[in-house]
Amino acid sequence: MSCGHYERGCHLLANCCGEWFPCRVCHDEDKEHKMDRHAVTRVRCRKCRCEQQPQQTCEKCKHVLGQYFCRVCNLFDHQGLEKGIFHCDQCGICRVGGRANYFHCDRCVGCFPISTQSSHKCVSEAMLKECCICLEDMFNSRESPSILGCGHLLHTACFKRMARFAHKFECPLCRSSLLSDASDNGNHDSDHDADGVESTDSDDDEIVHDDLESIQSDSDTVDSNDIVADVSRD
């Protein structure tokens, strides 16, 4: 049986608990611990149920386990081509959006759009820090990150909620104005898109000034009860 996260032809054996799961995300949603994608050594074909080492094609029935297969991350995805999934050796994980569209910053420890390279501001280990709004991991996040003009990162959804509901137009970390350039990175752990959340992001920058004007205009008409209900649903 497949899951709602990935289009693939196999199950993974979680070394941490010895149980089979359709994908790493299914495991993490069911357990109170995280599954190490790199530690997977056994997979099971969904067609013939043959247990084997991770590989692109089933050794018994020749069923394709993943049109995209990464031997390092043990990532299988039939939609890898459409999503532009690629493995970044420096990050150590697979990303989405196409290798040619991104550059890796060693100091920030992450991949960023080529279109932002000339104006890129380095912040030491920026991608390894938590989102300053929700305090969740940025590096392995399934949520798309936004790059603020100061170089700090936070989840795009968190940024938009902050701007709309809290009316904060400055970086929560360094207090720099958000009315300068900032963009949706559009590049995140490939789990995000491979998990069935189709990405419409491109490497084109989104100018935050326009977003903030739109958000601010919309927020003027939002009833306070609707704001509470909207936030509580997230």
Image: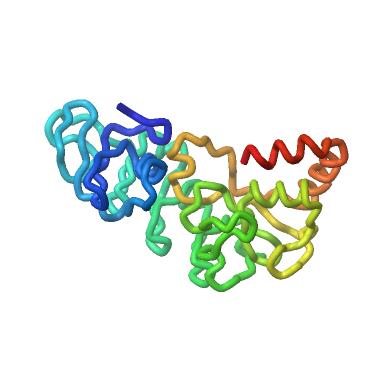
Q: In the picture, residue 45 is in which quadrant?
A: top left
Which residue lies at the image location 15% right of the left edge and 38% below the top edge?
Answer: 51
Which residue lies at the image location 61% right of the left edge and 52% below the top edge?
Answer: 155
* Residue 68 appears anywhere in the view: no
Q: In the picture, residue 131 is in which quadrant?
A: bottom right
Task: Say which of 36 and 187 sits in front.
Answer: 36
Question: Taking 64 as reference, is 89 left or right?
Answer: right
At which x and y percent is residue 227? 76, 39
* Residue 122 appears anywhere in the view: yes
At which x and y percent is residue 127? 53, 63
At which x and y percent is residue 143? 55, 47
Question: Taking 53 as reference, is 156 left or right?
Answer: right
- Quarter of the picture containing the C terminus is top right
Examine the rendered structure and indicate whether residue 151 appears above or below residue 68.
Answer: below
Which residue lies at the image location 70% right of the left edge and 57% below the top edge?
Answer: 182
Examine the rendered structure and indicate whether residue 16 appears above or below residue 59.
Answer: below
At which x and y percent is residue 172? 71, 63
Way the structure is coloured: rainbow
Q: Residue furthest left?
A: 60
Which residue lies at the image location 45% right of the left edge and 51% below the top edge?
Answer: 95
Question: Taking 162 as reference, is 66 left or right?
Answer: left
Task: Say which of 23 and 104 sits in front.
Answer: 23
Number of numbered discs visible in the structure rendering: 0
Task: Say which of 134 and 138 sits in front.
Answer: 134
- Quarter of the picture containing the N terminus is top left
Examine the rendered structure and indicate whether residue 175 appears above or below residue 13.
Answer: below
